[in-house]
Amino acid sequence: MGIEGLSEADAANELMRLARAIAKHDRLYHAEDSPEISDAEYDALVRRNAELEAAFPHLIREDSPSRKVGHAIAASPLGKVAHEVRMMSLDNAFSPEEVAEWLARMRRFLNLPEGEPLAITAEDKIDGLSCSLRYENGVLVRAATRGDGQVGEDVTANVQFIADIPKDLRSSRAQSRDLFGEGVSTSLDANGAWDGPAIFEVRGEVYMEKQAFTALNAAQHEAGGKLFANPRNAAAGSLRQKDASVTAKRPLRFWAHGWGAASEVPGATQTEVVERLKAWGFPVSPLFARVVGGTEEVVARFDAIGKARPSLPYDIDGVVYKLDRLDWQERLGFVAKAPRWALAHKFPAERAETIVEAIDIQVGRTGKLTPVGRLAPVLVGGVTVTNVTLHNRDEIARLGLRVGDRVVIQRAGDVIPQVVENLTREEARPAFPFPDHCPECGSEAVAEEGEVDVRCTGGLICPAQRTQRLEHFVSRKALDIEGLGEKTIAQFFALGWLESPADIFRLRARRSAILELEGWQEKSVDNLIAAIEAKRAPDAARLLFALGIRHVGEVTARDLMKNFHELPVLRELAERAHAGDAEAAAELTAIDGIGPSVVEALGDFFHEPHNVAVWEDLLGEVTPPRYEVQTVASRVAGKTVVFTGKLETMSRDEAKAQAERLGAKAAGSVSAKTDLLIAGPGAGSKLKKAAELGIEVVDEAGWAAIVAEAG
């Protein structure tokens, strides 16, 4: 279904489905190294999610895939490592037009003249496992996988067996000169001591070449061992071994493409730092190049790499572009999970034909009935596909889909699968009977007026909704209670011990009963109870997100709490807005990014007596402290600022980012609660209203002075 003509309700429902599906496939890919779908199919889901979020920004969910990187690491014998600098993901493009828009966005953000050339680096995007290598005074001290971007797995012992990774940069100097010539600048002083950065994290990809992958699978088959689906999975499985001697036997490679934490960065451009990485002995992409110009020049490099793709000894799925100047990278900064200054341009999707063998209905935590097509296994882009999400009842009708139909499957961007076409829709067979009752609890399933999604009306009596809401409540981005996973929640729910979030905090009274259950030891029970008790004073924004209120995602929850600080204050405003108080609604929507849908969802939540009962029961067990955000001290901290007119030295996005860093709230409209108006040329009604209200007004230079004062 296209974006045009899509209702807000349809968009919200589809975003919910996408968040669920992408989270599942992230877990299978990043945490378990066992994807069910191809890269193209996965990227199709991510792309659809991005399209919907761009068209309906006020519907962006707290669990949106656009705010996540990778997946929380699963229970593992390897230790956990917190990344000092988060390992980000990349936004994707699939056409020259999207590349052109990315270049234009950067120009707008940096406020560059249209004719000023941009220097962009381009390199092939290898399909490997992201790894961060920390060097202190030139010596490798730690290696970690990406994990969820914030916490990864410690693979220091394992990377010792990857020949491409230097263990001591001080001793790789001779090799560097041999490889790159006597003119290469090193980081040794006149006495031969390390003179490079005291701390430098090299980031890159661990991968396996195609020929080595084929040989490994042949050896695995002969030994009766596990066969790997593709080189990326083989590399990931080989690196993430508890026994490093297993890794030592696997033909792993590495190349560097960036960096994380650094006491200093050895260069002013991406190109200069990559050259320094080469000088230190790290392999980098042999196709790395600096391109100066616009869309035509950048896409020409993409086409050249695409032509070379079949002859490369390793798998690639696209080309990565990065803005070359590091000072501009710093200004551009990041969105929720990706840098604004980098982009992955993906190769086109692959397609295949197969048969729909069954259509199952899954019930989500909000009650949505999502149809899933079970397919005759088909190989698409090197990955066997057996399942495809069919979105909703209308999508099945649009495709005319029935069990037994032959369909065309596409893996867009090489990851998540989608049905592109039904090849046998004209054959005479009964239509698929979409259920009108919930398959989990038997309650009536209906689509509300204006909505396309069918939902179970059972609410908290529906086991699918109850258990999945509890899983969300304890998930990493919510309260993050370790040890209370899907299986444990299902077990305790079946015993009648968990029916609402507050019941989690009453589990300590069931310690003896839990110990009597099969598989539970005293240590594991005590660890679980300790993890729960540690959340008695939870972060207020996380708690708000954990409640699963529709449209209140992770970022929205933080935005709300940054402005209102206390949960009771937010509830009082939401109830007033629901009762028709225009002033309360205006106070909520004055927050940048908070729209009427969020206000309505909050009001609806607190209007339902059973929700209020859950809320009050929960707050009887936990006491979240006042929510405060650490910011730079400034004279606008805690104040509300509004930008109007044309900004000449920065973009509006950059100005808002500056305001947030200074502890100010950037609002979209002027009101009696506005403290400062920054007015550029062309300021109109907002400037007039500010004058009427006696609000302080400064120009762009005045704002720059405020920013400079804060340092």
Image (spheres, rainbow, N blue to C red):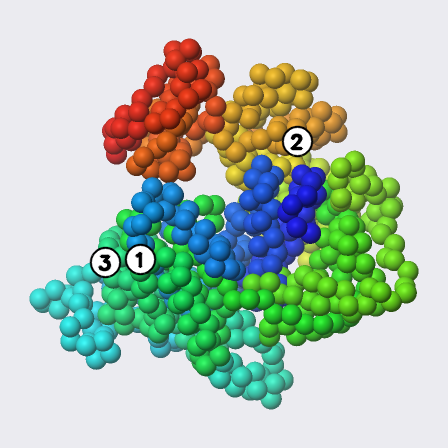
- Mark 3 to mark 1 CA distance (whole Å): 18 Å
* Relative horizontal placement of residue 623, taking residue 465 as reference (left or right): left
* Quadrant of the rendered image containing residue 411: bottom right
Question: Residue at point 72% right, 53% down?
Answer: 391
Mark 2: which amino acid? Ala
Question: Residue at point 54% right, 36% down?
Answer: 556
- Mark 2 to mark 1 CA distance (whole Å): 45 Å
Q: Of residues 558 and 270, which is closer to you in this image?
A: 270
Residue identified by numbered label 1: 119
Q: Where is residue 329 in the image (x, y as percent from the top left)?
A: 33, 50
* Relative horizontal placement of residue 386, taking residue 269 as reference (left or right): right
Q: In this view, does 699 lie above or below 435?
A: above
Res. 615 visible in picture: no
* Relative horizontal placement of residue 465, taking residue 577 as reference (left or right): right
Determine the secondary structure under disc 2: helix
Q: Badge 3 local density, few (<14 within 10 Å), some, or many (20+)? A: some
In the picture, the quarter occupied by the C terminus is top left
Determine the secondary structure under disc 1: strand
Task: State the mark number for residue 325.
Answer: none
Mark 3: which amino acid? Pro
Res. 669 visible in picture: yes
Q: Position of residue 15 (x, y in %)?
A: 64, 46
Mark 1: which amino acid? Ala
Residue identified by numbered label 2: 601
Q: Of residues 161 and 320, which is closer to you in this image?
A: 320
Q: Of residues 113 and 705, which is closer to you in this image?
A: 113
